[in-house]
Amino acid sequence: MKHIIQVGFGPLGIKTAQYIAKKETIKTVAVVDLNPEMAGKSLNEFCATLSDDVYISQSVDGALNQLNFKPDVAIITTVSSLEKLIPQVETVAKYGIPVISTCEELSYPWDLQPELSKKLDDICKANDIACLGTGVNPGFLMDYLPSVMSSICKDIKHISIERVQDATPRRIPFQRKIGAGLDMEAFKKKEAEGMLRHVGLKESVYLLANSIGLKLDKVTESLDPVIAEQDVASEAIKVAQGEARGVEQVAHGYVNGNCKIRMHFKAAIGEPRSFDRISVEGTPNFSTEIDGGINGDIATCAITINCINSILKAKPGLHTMADIGVPGYIN
């Protein structure tokens, strides 16, 4: 049995705990969340299928003081920012506990934030732990999966990845992150503040490029609102005609002025068709599509759990999906 401490118990943390509760070989034994309204409550108060003898603490120190053993892995589902994540990892690292996090900027930070990457790598090595950033996207669909599929190619001229999804069934924080329900003035304001976008698209470009041996000269990214042509709604957010129902982002990776990687991400409430598509121009040429797309909330929780064995085998330091052992389903 592998024991898990979870840091962060929002919608993603709760869903992760629910999935862990159904497993035979892993168990959540401690939970940390900074929300004072959650302090001291049992997991069972948030979901009937969860434990009634694990209580939420407001600090890692407090959670571990209640245990008489060290958990095997920490799963952190809190922030998208690498800078904000590092102190959280450091708090866990001092206990010698390996970390898996859904922090989007952690998925491949080396090119975009080299100083912070080195700082985190040094923390991990000093405490003899491995740390991994993963998730469905970034971390799998637009970067790791196409890198695996590229292994059948004799040569590659260009790779195009598209992820188009109906955000209607996604968790509320995700819908807000993509600007659903905002008028154009509010959308542009939040965009300028850096609070409105799918985080991790550039990280995905760099992860894929590194995996297939491309040294990129430049990476560009554009962001535009997806405008509602009629009123649409999810369970939590109503979008009037003319308001943003989501976001569309496109990133390009260049070598010697030539575009080698193109990534197109679109997520919006009321999107008529969801799909994930990988297209390779090379030898052989091919295109493969997942009709209906992969539900991001389900897959992010699942891959985070299914990387546990891989991170336990990894050497100390900061890792990406490109350099750990291949993860697999954990029963």
Image: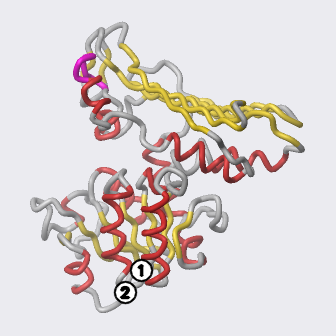
What span is colored magenta in the figure? 180-186
Q: Picture quarter containing residue 283?
A: top right
Q: Picture quarter containing residue 230?
A: top left
Pointer 1 and pointer 2: residues touching (CB < 8 Å)? yes
- Name the kind of residue labelled 1 in the image: Ile
Q: Residue at x 10, y 62 (%)?
A: 36
Secondary structure beneath dot 2 equals loop
Task: Say if the magenta span includes residue 183.
Answer: yes
**Residue 235: image x %, image y %?**
27, 29
- The total of numbered circles placed on residues is 2
Side of 312 relative to 326 (left or right): left
Residue wearing tag 2:
70
Residue wearing tag 1:
97
**Residue 104: image x %, image y %?**
44, 50
Judge the density around disc 1: few (<14), some (14-19), many (≥20) Cα neighbours within 10 Å: many
- Name the kind of residue labelled 2 in the image: Lys
Q: CA distance from mark 1 to mark 2?
A: 8 Å
**Residue 57: image x %, image y %?**
19, 72
Q: Residue furthest bottom?
A: 68
